[in-house]
Structure formats: structure tokens, C-alpha cells
Image (tube, helix red, strand yellow):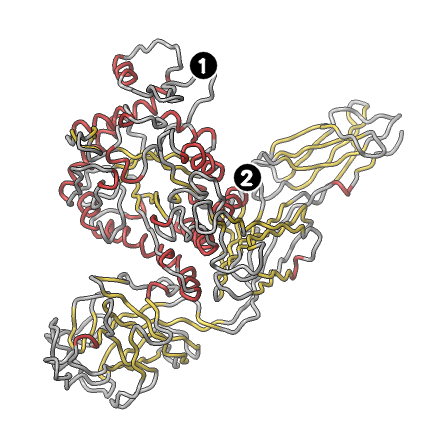
């Protein structure tokens, strides 16, 4: 018998790892916690819970009531549950009794250094401010005066907040600002003091509205250990979803925008058919008389393995207006409820039950199918109503949004009798449509679609307080305003505070739910429209730039961390008709391929964010590193306990034409200067490099992605005898956290090892040890070589 050889060069290794992050940069504050100012007593002398603000000289402090002008500090019902105001009795008379205040922040780590900021409010175009410092000024007003033009003063919404954050960042044209006071060490009781004073002034344009204090522990860069053996925290793949639109087949978006969006939506979530405000004038049966792709065309959910959200009309059905545009001709809730219920029946009963050519035995099913007008004289406007015989099934639709943004009209769609809804009308319409859908199919999920919990608080409260109404999920649209910014430093601040703002949007919704008697944790949440630069920036230079791509990736990870079931980008990540791949599209390509579904670790330092994710199907690990600034950074990744790595690849999204900036962009053909592709992915194979201390350069304003593909390790080949024959078998540990891989044994009798055939293959199963046996007994007259590999579909 000739010997058998197991070629170790062909054996792959399982990877587990721990990583650390070390930035060789100065220590600094990272995330801030907010303490709102609360005086000792209210204007009636009643003690206030959580009081933290007194006169700095130790005398009793009792503010006046909620009035604009006074000789004293006044306690006013604005901002975050109250502000302390200073404004004299008249224009020429400053207040006389607004002595220096001190706010004591508690619950800190004794002996620890903290960065401190003071918060105040100011309207647009005025110079309200605050005088503050970390030292007692003995009432002499020698501490610095800050207004919204002072150095270092930024809107509070641009601060990265921790768990304690303001709930109001802007109110009635007034913005909450933060001013830097420096650093101070907490005393032995875990306290620090901030001293606050006014200008003072009787000029209403320079008054003081003192809001509170923000503190953040000053930290140095330090290794961050990631236990890759832990289960991590799962998130929904829909967090990287996209919104689509049923645009007419005569438009470029249908031929370019939709297909390109679908490329990157694979495996995530999709919003359709009619999306946004278009849902509230959409008749799914007739397509509003236009050559638009109908419901069945959105079997994209099957073809691209994506969860589909559909939006039911709660306002009315339109017809052409003889004067141009459209008119609502039927806004009756009975009509809308019936239309929604029929839609659910079509999607979740008719389509699964019948195929083209089948007899339609149920009269209601026949009536619904006969009501569909899905063809016209327009070339190519002829769409199927049922699946073809033998065509794969489409998934049932689980999520049904009810209406869209009730306080915004639909005049953008040329509906001349557009209307909005107050809370009472919203409740009435939601009830009719939601209950009709549930009556048709109790297993589907229904929920309202809001702008956000601040603008439409009353609308949300109206339905959640009615405990008889079905509410399985709530969708909202947490748009941001990155596109309004051009200054790189401010853009960097905005990028670093995205998570805080997204938490604020989420918390607003949850608070309304809890305040109205429901359990917010019993409801799912989805951001069915989101754009970090704002909805209005689609196909603009703002969407085309690198800052937008970084902000979008940070938003995706923020929604993954919050546990949203879906987050839909609004709306085209490429140019809608010329197909220019904006940096955000290129980012979505890699999110599709490598984001996975498990967050193993998160780390933040200065302007760097680092996310480590795992794909639970393949075990692949990905380290996402985002540099929000226009300064280079260095990350030290200390991978520990790493066995053999099959492949490691470092990719970077950067400007190939030179230094990457936040303004680096891929411009479409309709932008100034014409089409220009500057931002591309680069790829470097780092397999074999020492990952126990991996120095990862993060050039300015780039997105870096380190992908680690695990292989197999500890393979044990063996010969065993059975029924007077000898057999070959190899055993090894299963790949951790990889549920969908298959293990394949390959064999070759070619000494040059150029030809391999599949010998055997096994599924992952649940066993911790994988065993594969060659089904052919060992030959005494020939040699055979083996290798073992992974199959990842």
C-alpha cells in the first residue's frame, strides 16, 4: 500500500480574535452627559427634586416665576424642563439681583478629570449668551461671556452624547448651544462645580437663558479588547435597507435608479410600492392610471432576499384634475379600508394560491383580480397579475405601514385639494385602515408612519393611548441636515454626533408610547426614510461627497445598535438616470457583502468609530473604521488568540486623485463640471501579516474595512478499518458562529495536485466536531491527496 498524504498547505483555519484600538493621540473627552439646571426651590418656595443650583455665595436662591423681565433670575418653562433667565425690567435697566450661581454636578468618579461645557439657549440672529467658568468669580462677572459667535461654541446637537442627553435641542426658533469651560478634576465626593452669571442686560437681544451643564470624562487612547468568542449582539439586516419608488416605466429611475438600488439592497430591506407621501394618494389596483410597476413587480423581495414594507393609503384616491394635476375624489375611510384589506388579500392569499391560467374559484378573489389595471397602450406597460406556473413563490408581506407623515400635505404631487390631519382625524383614519388589515390577516403587522415623535407627538399619542388599536411597529423618518454644512470642522462634529441624534429620535418615540400607557419594548421600530444629509439632497453635490458616505454608514450602524427592524435610505445611492456611483453607493456595496448580522464590538475615540461585525452564516469578521476628520489617524489593532486566518483583506474607500477630504466626491453628468469619478475602493491582501499588533492607518476622511475570513484548524486525519477495508477520515472543530457553511473534502490522485474532485460534503449541523469520510476505501495501489475547505453560499 502506498502512503496517503494530507496536504496541510490546502487546509484552512478557523479564526477567533480579540482586537484593541490604540490611537497615539492626546487624551480627550468623548461622550457627554447632560445635567439640567434645577434651582433649590421654585418661585413659590417649594423645594424641587434634583436641585443642583444655588447662589454661589451660599445665600438662599429662589427664582421669580415664568416672566420675561425681572430684577431676579426667573425660572421659565422652556428648553429641557426649564431654564434660568436673566433680563432686566426694561430696555435700559439691567437686573439688579441676578447674583452669581453655582451648579453642582454629582455622581462622577472622584479624582477623575472631566471636560465641562455650559449650555444656553439663543434665537437665530440674536446674541443671547451666558457667563460661566470653573472658578468662583466672587460675583464680579470676570468669568468669560459666551454667545453663539464665541470661539468653541457649537449647537448642542453637534455634541456626542452619552445616555444622559437633552431632549430638546431646538425650540420655537431657539437653539441650545454649548460653550467650552475647560477641564476640572472631580472632588473626593465625585462632584464638580460650574459658576454661572449673566451680562447683565436689559437688552432683550443679549439676555441669558441658562440651560445646564455637560461633562465628559477625559480619556486616553487605550487598547479595546474584543472577545470574538462571545455571542455578540444580533441586529437586523434591514438596517442597511433602501427605499424604492414605483416610478413610471418611461423615466430613467425605472431603468437605472431602481436596478442599481436593488444591487445593494440584496439581503436587507426594501420600501415600496408607492413610497413616501405618494403612498397617501396611491390606488394599488389602478396605479393611478399611470404606467408604473405594480405590486407583483416588487417580487424584488424574493429575487433580492429582502424584507418588503408596503404602505397603505389613509388619505384618499385621486383622479386627474381638468385644470392640471390631481384631485382627491374619494377620501372615505370605508373605501380606503376596503382597498387596504384587498391589497393584503392579494399579496398574502391570491398570489400564493393561484398561478397564471388557474381557475379563480373564490368570487372575492376574482373581483380583486378583475379590478387590477396593470397594462396600458404605453409600450412595455403590461405586467403580470399572477405568478407563472413553476415560478418560485414570493414571500408573504409582513409589515404594512399606515399612511405617511400626517402633518405634511401632498401638494408636491400636484394634488390641488391636498390636506393634512390633526390628531383626531389621524386616529380615525388609522383605526379604519389598521383594523381592516388585521381583520383580513391577523398575522401581519401594522403601524403608523410619522415624521418624528416631536413634530407629530399628538398624533402618535392619539393612537397609542387607544389600547384597542393594533400597533405592532412604528416607523419614523429621522432625517438629518449634514447637507446644510460646508465647513469641514462642523461636518466632523456632525458626523461624530449622529448616534446621539438618532438615539434622540428613537427616545422621543418611546417616551410618547410609555407616557400613554403602552410598553415601548413591546413594539418594533423602523426608520423607513432616512438620509443623513436630508431628503432634499438626492442627486446633489452633497449626496455625492465622502462626508455623506461616512455619515450614512454611521447612521446604518446607529440603527443596528438601536435594534431597528429596518432603515431605508432615501432614495437613490447612484444618480437616478446616469448611474454615477456616489461614494455612498460604494459603501453600500461593502455593507451588503460584509456587514453581517452581529455586532461584536464598538469603539470610539476622538473622530474615529470602529465597529466589528460578524456574519452568523459564514463566521466572517469585518472591522469597519470610519475617520470623520480631515486629519490622518492610526489605529492599533491588537488581535489576540488568533489561530490560522484563511484570508485577510484591507479595503479602503478613498479619493484616488489625491488626499481624501470630506468634500471628495463622485460627480454625475448633471453636476457642475460634468461627470468625475474620484472616490474608489482599494484592496490590499494582508493575509499572513502579524495581526497581534496590526497598525492600521486611517487616512483623513476615509472608510477602511478589514475583512477576516476564517478557515479550519486542528484537522486530524486518520485511517480506520471496517469490514476488512481501510478508510480515510478527517475530523476537526466546526467553525464557530457559522451556521450556513458546508465542509467539503476534496481528493486528487494527480501528483501535481492540479485536478481535484469532490469526495464528500457535510452540513454544519449542531455537532461541535466535524467528521468527513472518503466513501471510497483506501487503495493499495495508488496514492490519494486530500484537502478540506469551506463552502460559503
Number of marks in the rendered image: 2
Disc 1 vs disc 2: which is toward the camera? 1
Residue located 38% across and 10% down the image: 358
> Crowding near pointer 2: few (<14 within 10 Å), some, many (20+)?
some
Q: Nearer the viewer, residue 23 or 102?
A: 23
Spot occupied by residue 687 in the image (x, y as percentages of width and height): 69, 50
- Tell me which corner region of the image, top left, top right, bottom left or bottom right, holds residue 780: top right
Quadrant of the image containing the N terminus: top right
Quadrant of the image containing the C terminus: top right
Spot occupied by residue 730 in the image (x, y as percentages of width and height): 73, 36
Residue located 42% across and 38% down the image: 269
Spot occupied by residue 732 in the image (x, y as percentages of width and height): 69, 40
Residue located 18% across and 39% down the image: 418
Instruction: Classify 189 as above or below 492.
Output: below
Question: Of marks 1 and 2, which one's residue comes earlier in the chain?
Answer: 1
CB-based contact (under 8 Å), mark 1 and mark 2: no
Looking at the image, residue 637 sits to the left or right of residue 166; the answer is right
Instruction: Classify 434 as above or below 725.
Output: below
> Crowding near pointer 1: few (<14 within 10 Å), some, many (20+)?
few
Farthest-out residue, front: 673
Instruction: Classify 88 as above or below 595.
Output: below
Instruction: Report helix, strand or loop for mark 2.
Output: loop
Residue 641 visible to the viewer: yes
Spot occupied by residue 786 in the image (x, y as percentages of width and height): 77, 34
Residue 352 visible to the viewer: no
Instruction: Report helix, strand or loop for mark 1.
Output: loop
Residue on which the image places disc 1: 389
Residue on which the image places disc 2: 617
Instruction: Classify 214 as above or below 542.
Output: below
Q: Nearer the viewer, residue 347 or 613?
A: 347
Amino acid at each position: 500500500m502506498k502512503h496517503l498524504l494530507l496536504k496541510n498547505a490546502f487546509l484552512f483555519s478557523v479564526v477567533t480574535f480579540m482586537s484593541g484600538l490604540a490611537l497615539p493621540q492626546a487624551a480627550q473627552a468623548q461622550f457627554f452627559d447632560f445635567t439640567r439646571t434645577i434651582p433649590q426651590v421654585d418661585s413659590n418656595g417649594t423645594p424641587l427634586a434634583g436641585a443642583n443650583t444655588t447662589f454661589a455665595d451660599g445665600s438662599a436662591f429662589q427664582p421669580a416665576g415664568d416672566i420675561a423681565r425681572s430684577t431676579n433670575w426667573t425660572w421659565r418653562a422652556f428648553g429641557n424642563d426649564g431654564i434660568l433667565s436673566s433680563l432686566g425690567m426694561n430696555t435700559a435697566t439691567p437686573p439688579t439681583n441676578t447674583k452669581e450661581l453655582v451648579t453642582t454636578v454629582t455622581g462622577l468618579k472622584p479624582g477623575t478629570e472631566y471636560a465641562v461645557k455650559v449650555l444656553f439657549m439663543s434665537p437665530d440672529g440674536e446674541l443671547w449668551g451666558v457667563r460661566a467658568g470653573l472658578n468662583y468669580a466672587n460675583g464680579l462677572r470676570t468669568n468669560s461671556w459666551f454667545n453663539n459667535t464665541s470661539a468653541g461654541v457649537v449647537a448642542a446637537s453637534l455634541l456626542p452624547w452619552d445616555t444622559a442627553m437633552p431632549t430638546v435641542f431646538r425650540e420655537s426658533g431657539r437653539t441650545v448651544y454649548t460653550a467650552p469651560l475647560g477641564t476640572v478634576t472631580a472632588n473626593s465626593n465625585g462632584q464638580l462645580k460650574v459658576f454661572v452669571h449673566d451680562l447683565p442686560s436689559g437688552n432683550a437681544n443679549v439676555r441669558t437663558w441658562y440651560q445646564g451643564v455637560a461633562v465628559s470624562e477625559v480619556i486616553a487612547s487605550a487598547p479595546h479588547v474584543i472577545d470574538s468568542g462571545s455571542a455578540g449582539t444580533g441586529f437586523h439586516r434591514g438596517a442597511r435597507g433602501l427605499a424604492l419608488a414605483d416610478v413610471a416605466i418611461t423615466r430613467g429611475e425605472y431603468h437605472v435608479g431602481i436596478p442599481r438600488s436593488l444591487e445593494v439592497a440584496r439581503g436587507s430591506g426594501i420600501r415600496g410600492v408607492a413610497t413616501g407621501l405618494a403612498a397617501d394618494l396611491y390606488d394599488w389596483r389602478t396605479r393611478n392610471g399611470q404606467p408604473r410597476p405594480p405590486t407583483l413587480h416588487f417580487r424584488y423581495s424574493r429575487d433580492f432576499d429582502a424584507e418588503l414594507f408596503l404602505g397603505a393609503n389613509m388619505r384618499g384616491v385621486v383622479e386627474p384634475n381638468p385644470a392640471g394635476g390631481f384631485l382627491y375624489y374619494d377620501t372615505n375611510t370605508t373605501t380606503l379600508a376596503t382597498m387596504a384589506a384587498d391589497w393584503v388579500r392579494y399579496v398574502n392569499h391570491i398570489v400564493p394560491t393561484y398561478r397564471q391560467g388557474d381557475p379563480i374559484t373564490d368570487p372575492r378573489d376574482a373581483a380583486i383580480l378583475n379590478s387590477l389595471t396593470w397594462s396600458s397602450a404605453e409600450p412595455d406597460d403590461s405586467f403580470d397579475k399572477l405568478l407563472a406556473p413553476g415560478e418560485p413563490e414570493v414571500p408573504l408581506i409582513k409589515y404594512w405601514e399606515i399612511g405617511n407623515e400626517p402633518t405634511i400635505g401632498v401638494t408636491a404631487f400636484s394634488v390641488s385639494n391636498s390636506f393634512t390631519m390633526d390628531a383626531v382625524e389621524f386616529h380615525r383614519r388609522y383605526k379604519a385602515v389598521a383594523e381592516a388589515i388585521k381583520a383580513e390577516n391577523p398575522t401581519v403587522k401594522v403601524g403608523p408612519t410619522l415624521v418624528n415623535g416631536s413634530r407629530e407627538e399628538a398624533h402618535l399619542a392619539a393612537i397609542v393611548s387607544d389600547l384597542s388599536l393594533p400597533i405592532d411597529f412604528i416607523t419614523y423618518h429621522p432625517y438629518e441636515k449634514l447637507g446644510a454644512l460646508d465647513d469641514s470642522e462642523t461636518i466632523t462634529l456632525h458626523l461624530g454626533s449622529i448616534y446621539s441624534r438618532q438615539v434622540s429620535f428613537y427616545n422621543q418615540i418611546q417616551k410618547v408610547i410609555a407616557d400613554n400607557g403602552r410598553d415601548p419594548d413591546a413594539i418594533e421600530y423602523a426608520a423607513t426614510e432616512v438620509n443623513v444629509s436630508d431628503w432634499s439632497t438626492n442627486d446633489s453635490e452633497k449626496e455625492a461627497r465622502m462626508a455623506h458616505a461616512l455619515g450614512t454608514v454611521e447612521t446604518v450602524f446607529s440603527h443596528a445598535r438601536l435594534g431597528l427592524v429596518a432603515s431605508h435610505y432615501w432614495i437613490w445611492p447612484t444618480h437616478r438616470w446616469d448611474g454615477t456611483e456616489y461614494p455612498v453607493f460604494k459603501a453600500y456595496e461593502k455593507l451588503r457583502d460584509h456587514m453581517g448580522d452581529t455586532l461584536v464590538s464598538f469603539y470610539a475615540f476622538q473622530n474615529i468609530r470602529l465597529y466589528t461585525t460578524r456574519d452568523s452564516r459564514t463566521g466572517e469578521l469585518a472591522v469597519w473604521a470610519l475617520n470623520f476628520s480631515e486629519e490622518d489617524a492610526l489605529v492599533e489593532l491588537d488581535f489576540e488568540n488568533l489561530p490560522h486566518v484563511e484570508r485577510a483583506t484591507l479595503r479602503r474607500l478613498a479619493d484616488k486623485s489625491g488626499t481624501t477630504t470630506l468634500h471628495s466626491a463622485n460627480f454625475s453628468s448633471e453636476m457642475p463640471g460634468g461627470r468625475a469619478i474620484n472616490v474608489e475602493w482599494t484592496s490590499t491582501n494582508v493575509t499572513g501579516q502579524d495581526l497581534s499588533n496590526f497598525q492600521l492607518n486611517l487616512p483623513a476622511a476615509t472608510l477602511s474595512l478589514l475583512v477576516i475570513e476564517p478557515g479550519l484548524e486542528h484537522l486530524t486525519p486518520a485511517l480506520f478499518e471496517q469490514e476488512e477495508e481501510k478508510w480515510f477520515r478527517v475530523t476537526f472543530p466546526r467553525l464557530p458562529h457559522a451556521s450556513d457553511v458546508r465542509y467539503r473534502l476534496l481528493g486528487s490522485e494527480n501528483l501535481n495536485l492540479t485536478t481535484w474532485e469532490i469526495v464528500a460534503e457535510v452540513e454544519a449541523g449542531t455537532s461541535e466536531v466535524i467528521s468527513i469520510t472518503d466513501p471510497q476505501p483506501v487503495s493499495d495501489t495508488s496514492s490519494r491527496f486530500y484537502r478540506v475547505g469551506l463552502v460559503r453560499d
